[in-house]
Every structure is written in C-alpha cells, then in structure tokens.
C-alpha cells in the first residue's frame, strides 16, 4: 500500500503536536462522569487481578491499560493519556495511507490526516480517561488492514484479532463487526453468488448470529430504559429543573404501548417499534439528526454555528469520496458502519456529547480526504477547459 510522502508526514506530525498542545493547554486532563468508573475498575483490577464488574470485560482493553500504567507510575494517569495521544498520531498517519491507497495521490492522504486531526469534537477525547480515543484509533488501524486485505489465512487471523480487540475496547465495537462482515461478503461475493445454497446458508447463519448476539447484548444493556422515560439525549430526564435541561430533548410517552417487562429484550424492542411506528419514526429521526450533525440545544450559538459549517463541508467532501470508492468492499464497510450505528442510535438514545459518533468517524474521514482530491481535480479540469488553447 503506498504511503504518504515524508514532508507530508512532517506536516501531519506538526499538526498533531499543535492540536495536542491546544488540547492540553485549553482542556487539560478531564475525568468525566464515566472516567471515574473506568479508573475504579482499573484500580480494582490492579489490586485484585480480576474485574470489579462482569460487564467490565467489554471494556477490558482500556481498563487493563489504565491499571498497568497506574501500577507502573504510582497512579499517575498522564502516561495513559500520552499513549492515547501517540496512538492517535499513528492513526492519523494510518488513515492517510488508507486514503492515499484509494486515490493514488499523496495529497488525499494529507487531506484525510489533517481532517482527522482538526476534527476537534472527536480528537478532544485523547486527553480524557475514556474509551473513545482508543476505539477511534483501533478502527483506523482496522481500516488500514482492510485496505490491504488479500484473503490469505494470515489476513483473516489478524483481522479476527483486531476485531476482537475493538470489541473489548468498547461494546459499540459490535457496529464495526457488522461492517467487517459486510466487507467480507462483498469481497467474496463472486464465490458466494455462484451457488444459491451458499447465499441461503449465509443468510441463515447471519440471522442466527444476530439473534443470539443481539439478545446477549440487550440482556446487558436495556435500550428500552431510555425510551420509557422519553429521552432523546441519554439521561435528560435526570436534569429536569436544572439549567441544562431542554424539554425538546424529551418526548411525550403518554399513550405509547410497551411490552411486558418480563419479555425478552429483542421482543420488547420489536414490539415497541411495531406498536408505535409514528413515534419511533419521529424520535428516531431526531436522534439521528443530532448524531449526524453534532448539534445540541445546550451548546453555545457559536459552537453550533461551527458544527453546521464543519459538518456540511465534511459531508460534501464525503459525497465525492463515496462516488470514488463506494462500490469497493471498504466502501461497503464504511456505509454499513454508518447505517448500523445510526440505526442503533435511532432505537436507543443519542449521547450527551456525541461520543456515539466515533465508530463512523474514521470511514467518513477517508471519504472526505478522497473527496477533497476529487473536488480539486474537478476544479482543475474545469479551469483547464476554459483556458485559451495555444495555437
């Protein structure tokens, strides 16, 4: 896979250094609400060699890393944050190589890397004791492997290892797993479509896997919990009467039909959707809108204005990038992750600070990087066409 030219690597590293200087200077080290839980779980693991909560296994990679650094550096969290930041730098270079490989132009890689580093709402997780930074970097590394996938045994083994690690960084990694499955189906489509029986077996197997896997995860995380209190943004009901509360981020649940609490989680979600289709369509669309735009009523006017401009530019560039690689296996991977992630948000809730956008970000960055060069090439070709021809 072609890489990025050396001077462009220097530009990306310099940008990474400047961005992270601002992150540390402006935001500093942040221990948010969920940070305390990860730190407590890591402390427990360091002292007892086991998980504090069985569900911690789904966050075992970051918890184990925090526990290791805390043990080596006497509880200091800065080394863990430095590691996150360094991995993010490598992720930026990696995502640049992915974009370059599909456009065969080093400038596409530079554009993708710069977009990745300058996307403030996502890069800012590097200085927080959370799981989003590691998840984002891991997906970048996964995409690099997918872009060079050659269907060897070694390729499949390493792909499986990467996918397992992503799932153990954060359970939303399951969205990425679905994307990888679609990638492999697209990659092997000529073989699968040669016989109808292969397609039938595949559909049956995937349906069974989705039912078992979905049921297991929903037994742990009840998506209906937030729907039963009408939350559009997670835990908004707990802020009622406080300055950050916005009534528009909760919906009226009177008259809605919910399944009996003793039923299976998958059945409860299915029943809720079928019984309240208009409500689900309305609230689901609103959740996806907040997810894809990043906008929130409680953000400042300036920040929301920035989001409108930034996200509009990103999606315009991504559209042109999609036109270039949309039919490739990795194009299918990117679109699957976006669709599945949006669907999960539609049936649950959008997060307070849009952390749930992270699974989609690396793919969108690749599309935007490629789209940047598509637009520049298109503009250049039009400029050349209107120049007077030499006689």
Image (cartoon, rainbow, N blue to C red):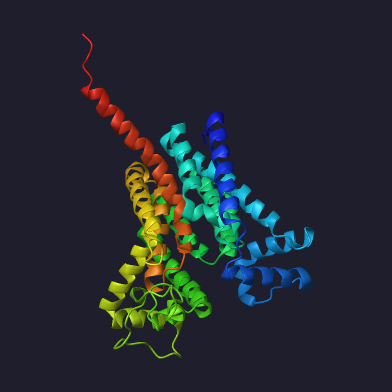
Q: Relative to 32, is 330 above or below?
A: above
Query: What's the residue at 44%, 66% (across, down)?
Result: 206
Position of 170 compared to 385: left or right? Answer: right
Tell me where residue 346 sits by quadrant.
Answer: bottom left
Position of 209 compared to 304: left or right? Answer: right
Position of 20 compared to 346: left or right? Answer: right
In the image, 153 versus 298, the foreground residue is: 298
Query: Is there any visible trace of residue 5 in the rendered image?
Result: no
Image quadrant where one finds the C terminus: top left
Question: Where does residue 171 sit, x and y in percent of width and height?
Answer: 54, 67
Query: What's the residue at 67%, 56% (across, down)?
Result: 80
Q: Relative to 310, is 208 above or below?
A: below
Question: Where does residue 297 sit, x and y in percent of width and height?
Answer: 37, 67
In the image, 365 versus 236, the foreground residue is: 236
In the image, 284 versus 344, the foreground residue is: 284
Q: Relative to 348, is 117 above or below?
A: above
Query: Is there any visible trace of residue 334 in the rendered image?
Result: yes
Tell me where residue 371 sits by quadrant.
Answer: top left
Tell me where residue 274 sits by quadrant.
Answer: bottom left
Question: Where does residue 133 sit, x and y in percent of width and height?
Answer: 56, 56
Q: Relative to 52, is 383 above or below?
A: above
Question: Where does residue 49 sit, x and y in percent of width and height?
Answer: 76, 70
Residue extending furthest toward the front: 243
Residue extending furthest toward the top: 391
């Amino acid at each position: 896979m072609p890489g990025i030219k050396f001077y462009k690597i220097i530009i990306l590293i310099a940008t990474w250094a400047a961005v992270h200087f601002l992150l540390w200077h402006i935001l500093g080290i942040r221990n948010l609400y969920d940070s305390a839980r990860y730190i407590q779980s890591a402390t427990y693991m360091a002292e007892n060699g086991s998980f504090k909560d069985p569900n911690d296994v789904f966050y075992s990679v970051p918890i184990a890393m925090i526990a290791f650094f805390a043990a080596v550096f006497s509880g200091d969290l800065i080394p863990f944050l430095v590691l996150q930041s360094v991995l993010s730098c490598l992720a930026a270079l990696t995502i640049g190589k992915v974009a370059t490989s599909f456009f065969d132009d080093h400038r596409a890689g530079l554009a993708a890397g710069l977009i990745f580093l300058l996307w403030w709402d996502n890069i800012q997780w590097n200085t927080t004791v959370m799981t989003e930074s590691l998840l984002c970097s891991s997906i970048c590394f996964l995409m690099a492997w997918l872009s060079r996938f050659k269907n060897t045994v070694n390729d499949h083994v390493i792909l499986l290892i990467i996918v397992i690690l992503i799932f153990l960084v954060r359970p939303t990694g399951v969205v990425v797993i679905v994307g990888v499955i679609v990638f492999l189906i697209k990659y092997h489509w000529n073989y699968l479509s040669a016989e109808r029986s292969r397609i039938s077996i595949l559909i049956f197997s995937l349906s069974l896997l989705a039912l078992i896997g979905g049921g297991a995860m929903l037994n742990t995380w009840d998506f209906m919990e937030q729907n039963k209190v009408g939350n559009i943004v997670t835990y908004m009901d707990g802020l009622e009467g406080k300055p950050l509360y916005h009534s528009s981020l909760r919906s009226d649940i009177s008259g809605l039909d919910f399944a009996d609490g003793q039923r299976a989680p998958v059945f409860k979600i299915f029943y809720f959707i079928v019984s309240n289709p208009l409500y689900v369509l309305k609230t689901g669309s609103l959740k996806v809108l907040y997810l894809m735009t990043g906008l929130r009523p409680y953000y400042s006017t300036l920040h929301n204005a920035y989001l409108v401009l930034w996200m509009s530019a990103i999606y315009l560039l991504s559209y042109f990038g999609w036109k270039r690689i949309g039919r490739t296996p990795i194009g299918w991977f990117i679109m699957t992750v976006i669709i599945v992630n949006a669907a999960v948000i539609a049936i649950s809730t959008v997060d307070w600070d849009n952390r749930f956008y992270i699974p989609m970000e690396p793919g969108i960055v690749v599309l935007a990087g490629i789209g940047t060069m598509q637009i520049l090439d298109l503009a250049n070709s039009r400029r050349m066409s209107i120049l007077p021809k030499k006689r």
